[in-house]
Amino acid sequence: MKAVKIIGKVIRIILTIVLLVIFVFVIAQRVSKGKIDLLGYQAYTVVTGSMTPKIEVGDIIVIEKVDPASLKKGDVVTYEGSKGDLKGLVLTHRIVDIKKDEKDNKYHFITKGDANDTEDPEITEDNIRGKMIYKSVVFSFVSKLMLRPGFFYGLFVVISIYFIYQVLSMILSKDDDDDEEEGDRKKSK
């Protein structure tokens, strides 16, 4: 019986830590505007329909930092725009053309949103933040809910209460375990 309690406690602690890491990572990403990565990975929330139907508004995508030489036509990349209306914006679009410039010895890319009629201005490998490797269905669903007014704050409150509950239950169950051990020692005397 004690083994089951210990295993349950370990699983609960691991799940709490995983949820906490994900929660902190998502908040850090929002605050830093996508400039923080975790082991070379970054998460972004899609805010426009330029890549529909593959990527919808509110979807959460995960990108991985990659060597620009490994990118090929058809890859979906996240980059920072450097010209015109896109200057300073972070976009996720598909590569439609690649060339290596002999003058600056850098790769140059032309990208385009799947739902857009025109190509984006040319960018260099310096603009690329990473290649999209994953679209999270679960987190995308939660992200879309968070776009509704008040839901984000409600979710934040619920998660905060959950973490407080977990911490308190760990502290209180430790006290209960100490009481049990003390009682066991008294019985054995």
Image (cartoon, rainbow, N blue to C red):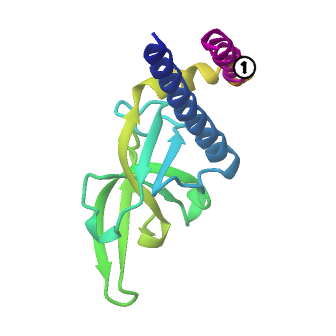
Q: Is residue 30 left or right of residue 4?
A: right
Q: Is residue 53 left or right of residue 88?
A: left
Q: Quadrant of residue 173?
A: top right
Does 47 appear above or below 161?
A: below
In percent of width and height, residue 130 lies at: 42, 57
Inspect this view and state whether residue 119 appears.
Answer: no
Does 173 appear above or below 57?
A: above
> Looking at the image, which is closer to me, 23 or 131?
23
Magenta stretch prevailing secondary structure: helix
Q: What span is in magenta? A: 168-189
Q: Circle 1 sits on which residue?
A: 175
Magenta region includes residue 118? no
What residue appears at the point 47 percent right and 72 percent down from the top-left corner? 126
What residue appears at the point 43 percent right and 67 percent down from the top-left corner? 122
Residue closest to the far bottom: 103
> Looking at the image, which is closer to me, 67 or 50?
67
Tag 1 secondary structure:
helix
> Looking at the image, which is closer to me, 100 or 37?
37
In percent of width and height, residue 144 lies at: 55, 23
Q: Is residue 133 left or right of residue 181?
A: left
Q: Is residue 64 left or right of residue 186?
A: left
> Looking at the image, which is closer to me, 138 or 184?
184
Q: Amino acid at mark 1?
A: Asp
> For the N terminus, which image quadrant?
top left
In percent of width and height, residue 151 lies at: 69, 18
What residue appears at the point 26 percent right and 52 percent down from the top-left corner? 74
> For the C terminus, which image quadrant?
top right
What residue appears at the point 42 percent right and 49 percent down from the top-left corner? 63
In percent of width and height, residue 161 lies at: 73, 18
Residue closest to the far front: 189
The residue carrying pointer 1 sits among few (fewer than 14), some (14 to 19) or many (20 or more) residues within 10 Å by Cα, namely few
Does 106 appear above or below 168?
A: below
